[in-house]
Image (cartoon, grey):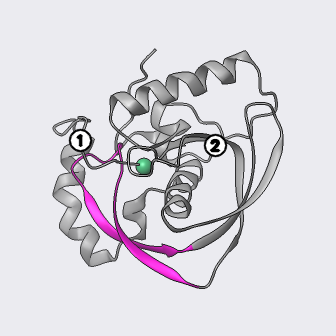
Amino acid sequence: MLYEIQTYGKKVLRRKTEEISIIDDTIREIVSNMFESMYAAEGIGLAAPQVDKSIRLFVIDLSPIDESESKRVFINPKIVAYGDETDEYEEGCLSIPTVREIVTRPTTIRIIYQDLKGDTFEEEVDDFLARVIQHEHDHLEGILFVDHLSKLKLSLLKKTLKKIEKGEIGVEASENFEL
Ligand code: NI
């Protein structure tokens, strides 16, 4: 089942999400639908609030840009440490269609999360995967990538963001691998 992608202006994108206490069939079905919805929109990462579910869960699949990657599910993720080094990358988001801006983020993170079996993992992650995880983790805190921009950059985007809010710009599959 395809979920509708929630776009900029929707309250759910600004809400802090709830921990998932039981990983049951309902959660497994949501995860499956999230992958389906993400692939349909040609995204490589999708967080639960983007499909109107205020729970601590996101999915990632970087295989379109890295063959060695495949489906990843992060339940109750928590970034517990950030490296000192940072890098810049032009990010996009399925919830903020047509907008792409350079965001500076730490290159390395340490994350604790559960998988669909409920097993807990602690991993050190770097480079692009670390960036995508930080973007999706932000979604769980009600933070969007435009929140990381300077006031000047943000003021230049104001009109576009208003248009998205009014529904004048919608989600379309793009070849940009949005998050
Ligand atoms: Ni996003």
User: Which quadrant holds residue 57?
Assistant: top right
Q: Which residues are magenta?
A: 85-107
Amino acid type of the residue that numbered disc 2 sits on in the rendered structure: Thr
Mark with earlier residue (2, 1): 2
Within the image, what quadrant is residue 106 found in? bottom right
Q: Position of residue 52 (x, y in %)?
A: 49, 31
Q: CA distance from mark 2 to mark 1?
A: 27 Å
Quadrant in the picture for residue 40:
top left
Left or right: residue 111 versus residue 164 is right
Residue at 36% in and 50% down: 93
Q: Is residue 110 above or below residue 93?
A: below
Q: Position of residue 6 (x, y in %)?
A: 39, 35
The image shows residue 46 at horizontal and vertical percentages of 48, 41
Question: Which residue is label 2 attached to?
Answer: 17
Q: Residue at x 64, y 36 (%)?
A: 55
Q: Position of residue 4 (x, y in %)?
A: 38, 25
- Residue 132, label in figure: none
Name the chief secondary structure element in magenta: strand
Instruction: Judge: label 1 CB < 8 Å from ligand 1.
Output: no
Q: Residues within 10 Å of mark 2 (few under 14, many from 20)?
A: many
Residue 143 is covered by the magenta coloring: no
The residue type indicated by label 1 comes to Ser
Q: Residue at x 47, y 31 (%)?
A: 51
SS at mark 2? Answer: loop
Asked whether residue 91 is drawn in magenta, I would say yes
In front of the other: 165 or 130:
130
In the rendered image of this protein, does residue 58 appear above or below residue 35? below
Foreground mark, 2 or 1, reads 1
Q: Which mark is residue 174?
A: 1
